[in-house]
Image (cartoon, rainbow, N blue to C red):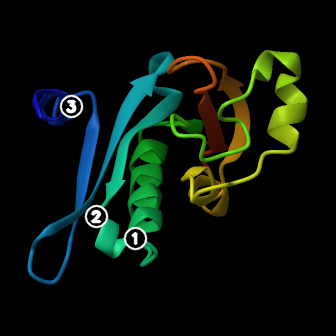
Amino acid sequence: MPAARETVVESLASDKISRIALDDSSNIVGWIGGLPMYDGRVWEIHPLVVAEHCRGQGIGRALVQDLEALVREKGALTLWAGSDDEHDETSLGGVDLYEDVLGSIRSIRNLANHPYEFYLKVGFQIVGVLPDANGPGKPDIFLAKRVPR
């Protein structure tokens, strides 16, 4: 809980973007944050969260589109996200990616509803992985998309 609280407080800094989605009863059902990098030409999505009971309803897509519009106004060229595979939810988890990083990315499979497929559906591409980012066989999957002008 302290780490989560710290993430929320950090997301409210003046140089960052933090947006929420509300349901009809004004309950928070989603949250997206944006962090500028490379002098604002690139923005990282951190975090993107949608309440479990609300997933698949377009809330995540709407949050990404909203953030994309806001960073476009700030001159961004690229939006990116990292999506960890700490529980072998993709074919990249639990293996030694150093043996064939590019081949592993090319043949990625979603084994347990990993969110990388959500990012693909909203226009992102897998642009790389960091093997063992979260421990042996637990990579971070990097996804990015061009911010349309």
Circle 3: is it few (<14), some (14-19), or many (20+) Cα within 10 Å?
Answer: some
Q: Measuring 15% from the left and 83% from the top, which residue is drawn there?
A: 24
Q: Which amino acid does label 2 sit on?
A: Ala
Q: Measuring 73% from the left and 33% from the top, which residue is drawn there?
A: 127
Give the mark toward the camera: 3 or 1.
1
Q: Can the viewer see residue 149 in this picture?
A: no
Residue 133 occupies which quadrant of the picture? top right
Up the image or down, 137 lies above or below 75; here it is above
Q: Earlier in the sequence, mark 3 or mark 2?
A: 3
Q: Name the residue under label 1.
A: 55
Say which of 44 and 103 sits in front.
103
Q: Are marks 1 and 2 in contact (CB under 8 Å)?
A: yes
Q: Where is residue 42 in the image (x, y as percent from the top left)?
A: 53, 29
Q: Where is residue 99 in the image (x, y as percent from the top left)?
A: 86, 18
Give the alpha-carbon distance from disc 1 to disc 2, as whole Å.
6 Å
Residue 78 occupies which quadrant of the picture? top right
Q: What residue type is labelled 1?
A: Arg
Q: Which amino acid does label 3 sit on?
A: Thr
Give the mark toward the camera: 3 or 2.
2
Dot 3 lies on which element?
Answer: helix
Decide if residue 142 is on the left or right side of residue 66: right
Q: Name the residue under label 3.
A: 7
Q: Are marks 3 and 1 in contact (CB under 8 Å)?
A: no
Decide if residue 85 is on the left or right side of residue 52: right
Q: Measuring 47% from the left and 51% from the top, which residue is drawn there?
A: 68
Q: Name the residue under label 2.
A: 51
Q: Can the viewer see residue 3 in this picture?
A: yes
Circle 2: is it few (<14), some (14-19), or many (20+) Cα within 10 Å?
Answer: few
